[in-house]
Amino acid sequence: MTEKSETKRRGRPATGHGDVAPVRVDKAVKTAFDAAVAAAGSNRSKVTEQLWAWYARRPGAELPERPDPQ
């Protein structure tokens, strides 16, 4: 039997930056948020990080761009 030099790690590979911050959100809110993010041409992680920075009053933080209502 051969010995493995590395054990295979489970899950997504590390991106090299940021911490994971899971949050619980109502399914309807998540669906509407994802649709708005897609309409704005962005992604959920980027918009969430912008919202957190704005709420925490980080220097230079601004609210993310919102899509026009349809």
Image (cartoon, rainbow, N blue to C red):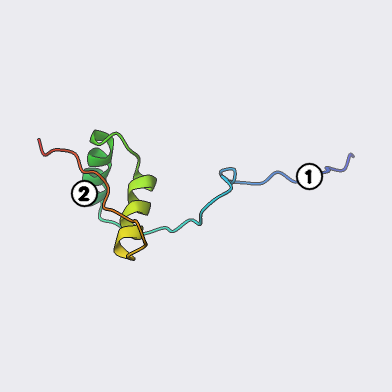
Q: Can I make out residue 57 in this image?
A: yes
Q: Disc 1 marks which amino acid?
A: Glu
In the image, taking residue 7 as reference, residue 64 lies left or right, namely: left
Percent position (x, y) of residue 18? 51, 54
Mark 2 and mark 1: span between their CA atoms? 42 Å
Circle on res. 6: 1
Element on which disc 2 rests? helix
Q: Where does label 2 land, which residue?
A: 28
Percent position (x, y) of residue 25? 29, 56
Q: In the rendered image, which quarter contains the N terminus? A: top right
Nearest the viewer among 70 and 29 is: 70
Of the image marks 2 and 1, the number of the one nearer the N terminus: 1
In the image, taking residue 70 as reference, residue 53 lies left or right, namely: right
Percent position (x, y) of residue 44? 34, 44
Q: Can I make out residue 24 in this image?
A: no
Q: Residues within 10 Å of mark 1 (few under 14, many from 20)?
A: few
Point out the residue furthest to the bottom here.
Answer: 56
Percent position (x, y) of residue 11? 57, 45
What residue lies at 25% left-to-right and 55% top-to-bottom? 26
**Residue 38 falls in image quadrant:** top left
What residue lies at 59% left-to-right and 43% top-to-bottom? 13
Q: In the rendered image, which quarter contains the C terminus? A: top left
Circle on res. 38: none
Element on which disc 1 rests? loop
Q: Disc 2 marks which amino acid?
A: Ala
What residue lies at 39% left-to-right and 47% top-to-bottom? 45
In the image, taking residue 23 as reference, residue 70 lies left or right, namely: left
Image height of 38 relative to 44, above or below: above
Nearest the viewer among 69 and 63 is: 63
Q: Residues within 10 Å of mark 2 (few under 14, many from 20)?
A: few
